Image (cartoon, helix red, strand yellow):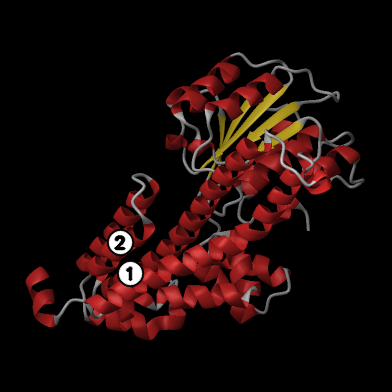
Amino acid sequence: MTVWDSLVGQAPAIEALRTAVESHGMSHAWLFTGPPGSGRSNTAVAFAAALQCEQHGLGPDCPDGCHACHTVLAGSHADVAVVRTEKLTIGVKGVRDLVRRAALTPMGNRWQILIVEDADRLTEQACNALLKAIEEPTPRTVWMLCAPTVEDLLPTIRSRCRLVALSTPTTAEVAGFLTGLGCDAPRASYAARASQGHIGRARALAFDDAVRGRRQDIVSIPARLTSLGACMASATRLAETAKAEADEITAELDAREKTDLDAAYGVVERGRRPREYAPALRDLEQAQKTRAKRRQLDVVDRGLTDLMSVYRDAIAVATGAPGDLVNEDIRGDIDRIVQTSTAELNLRRIGWIFEAREQMLEFNVPVALALESMMVALRVPEAAELGHRT
């Protein structure tokens, strides 16, 4: 299976990129947009491999697996830089380093390619620094920016980029992809529905029992919110589970970075700490703290998406909307939510979840506080209260 094959449901975009490799519609700047899990960065990397391909311009489909294709896909090509951030934003310093690199002549005979994942995290200063480089490109430099929507970037930047819009794959397409990886049909169907088109999430749900268990715990929350105590307990559990999962993800990387820092300053060999070691250690610890916070927010954000899917299903059932439910496996809970609420109330609940997400991501409200407020708002109303709301 090639990288192109893993881009489920993106045939039109792939065809456009293959055409561009043949010098039909090639541009010095590209903007890849699409919902989470649609494969924005994977598409950019596959396109970079095709542009650097020494023999056929096929990239991931190169029949000979040339050195250029292999190194691009492995992340070691000298003329392809992929910028990823573990922070909440991408600052101007990192972008200026990229701009300086963009001005260099490629070491090979093809392109200097710079891929910026999460371009929506660029600060205003970083955007301004990037704009100048895109306005005055060098002949053999290609910028590839990845963001959820075109609105996530300044109009002056997106107007200078050729847009590649990726779409959310259908449930059938995701299920077919998982079946091709060896997943049995019932589990593939469940993972395809529960992931809501997010390919990485679908793979995890299909093959990782722990991931499925955590999701089941989250989607069971709405039916349990019958009292203030239950609301507070659910908020605490979600916050603690998200922190534990984030810590599990980052612990090994943190330890490896600390070991590398000690080795770089000779702490292990000489048994003493040079004067420069303390500020370097502080910077590392601060970066790790920022990364851990982002990881926790990412895990919570994923949980909020799963919560919204429950209320979305309740609205679908209440209004008789066609199509499969995302959470067909908890149909009993969905029916109880429908009986104790209205479609309008569930729509407002989705809005309250969005508000909690905004408080955490945009206004830096502590996770536990934002979740407590949200859970109380989501509480199942008493019959008299429901009548008053309607």
Residue 255 lies in quadrant: bottom right
Task: Indicate left or right for 134 with 239 as reference.
Answer: right
Task: Indicate left or right for 383 with 289 as reference.
Answer: left
Q: Residues within 10 Å of mark 1 (few under 14, many from 20)?
A: many
Q: Earlier in the sequence, mark 2 or mark 1?
A: 1
Image vertical order of residue 125 relative to residue 89, above or below = above
**Which numbered dot is residue 387?**
none
Helix, strand or loop under label 2: helix
Judging depth in this view, the residue of 302 and 253 nearest the camera is 253
Task: Indicate left or right for 143 with 169 as reference.
Answer: right
The amino acid type of the residue labelled 1 equals Tyr
Residue at image coords 57%, 52%? 38
Is residue 310 at least partly visible in the picture?
Answer: no
Mark 1 highlights which residue? 311
The amino acid type of the residue labelled 2 equals Ile
Outermost bottom residue: 332
Judging depth in this view, the residue of 359 and 107 nearest the camera is 359
Residue at image coords 55%, 75%? 212
Helix, strand or loop under label 1: helix
The location of residue 98, given as percent across then percent down, is: 65, 26
**Which numbered dot is residue 350?**
2
Residue at image coords 77%, 33%? 51
Label pair 2/1, CB-CB below 8 angstroms? yes
Residue 25 lies in quadrant: top right
Judging depth in this view, the residue of 260 and 237 nearest the camera is 260
Residue 118 lies in quadrant: top right
The location of residue 218, given as percent across then percent down, is: 43, 73
Image vertical order of residue 292 relative to residue 240, above or below = above
